[in-house]
Amino acid sequence: MPDSAKPRINKQVKLHSFGSRNSPLVIDAETISFKGKQLRIKEINGILYWVSPVVFYHYMIGRRYHIGFRTPDDQLDIVFRSFFGFSKKYFKKLCNKILDAVWEPVTDNILQQGIDALRAGKAADFEQCQVSAEGVYLCRKQLLITWEDLVYEKMYNRLVLNSKSDHAVFTNLELSKCWNVDVLITLLDWLTEQGGLKEIQQTGAKPGTATL
């Protein structure tokens, strides 16, 4: 069997600290399969990863690990829970293995789709905002922050997009809820730091033309 065809992960895993290892997880170069659901990696256009506390009566009793994958037609959520510190190392190591297997090919593909759209004179759609040659359009507020006016900053739990000239114009994209935030950050870096903006402004994509 060629190396590319061999499963990167093929094991029975447990879903929480006190569970049994009886949930099948298989990841190869083409697909992700978990608990009977399968997605093709090349069709994935959304990815999300976050670790959040499990709280009971204001006390933290564990951690919830969530890795999400989305295609135009389906969604696969891999969720693990550790309680009272039990299996914390197990789930951390397992999540790292999953991300090592899929993060780079998935995010590279989504990023390239965004760059290709911008080069074609279109806008790259990131659900709550759209990136174009004119700037970043905030979909919910229906406001455009031009490139000259844009400030963006990645915090530990969110990406903040701000207007320099109007502090009332901003949005927070939470890493725990919003898809493709890390890809958006990489795209913004490409545009503002690596000459991408100068390249796409020759075509002049306008906000409102969703592509991803």
Image (tube, helix red, strand yellow):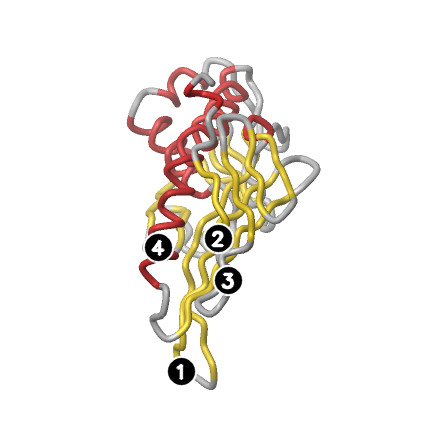
Q: Indicate the secondary structure of the residue bearing disc 1.
A: strand
Residue with the mark numbered 3 = 20
Q: Earlier in the sequence, mark 1 or mark 4?
A: 1
Residue with the mark numbered 2 = 13
Pick the front one: 118 or 137: 118
Question: Which amino acid type is marked by label 2?
Answer: Val
Question: Which amino acid type is marked by label 4?
Answer: Lys
Q: Indicate the secondary structure of the residue bearing disc 4.
A: helix
Few, some or many C-alpha atoms within 10 Å of disc 3 (few <14, some 14-19, many ≥20)? Answer: few
Few, some or many C-alpha atoms within 10 Å of disc 1 (few <14, some 14-19, many ≥20)? Answer: few
Q: Position of residue 49 (x, y in %)?
A: 45, 49
Q: Earlier in the sequence, mark 1 or mark 2?
A: 2
Instruction: State which quadrant residue 65 falls in.
Output: bottom left
As drawn, 77 above or below 207: below
Q: Residue at x 55, y 42 (%)?
A: 69
Q: Residue furthest left?
A: 193
Give how far apart the Cα atoms at labels 1 and 2 are: 27 Å
Q: How many marks?
A: 4
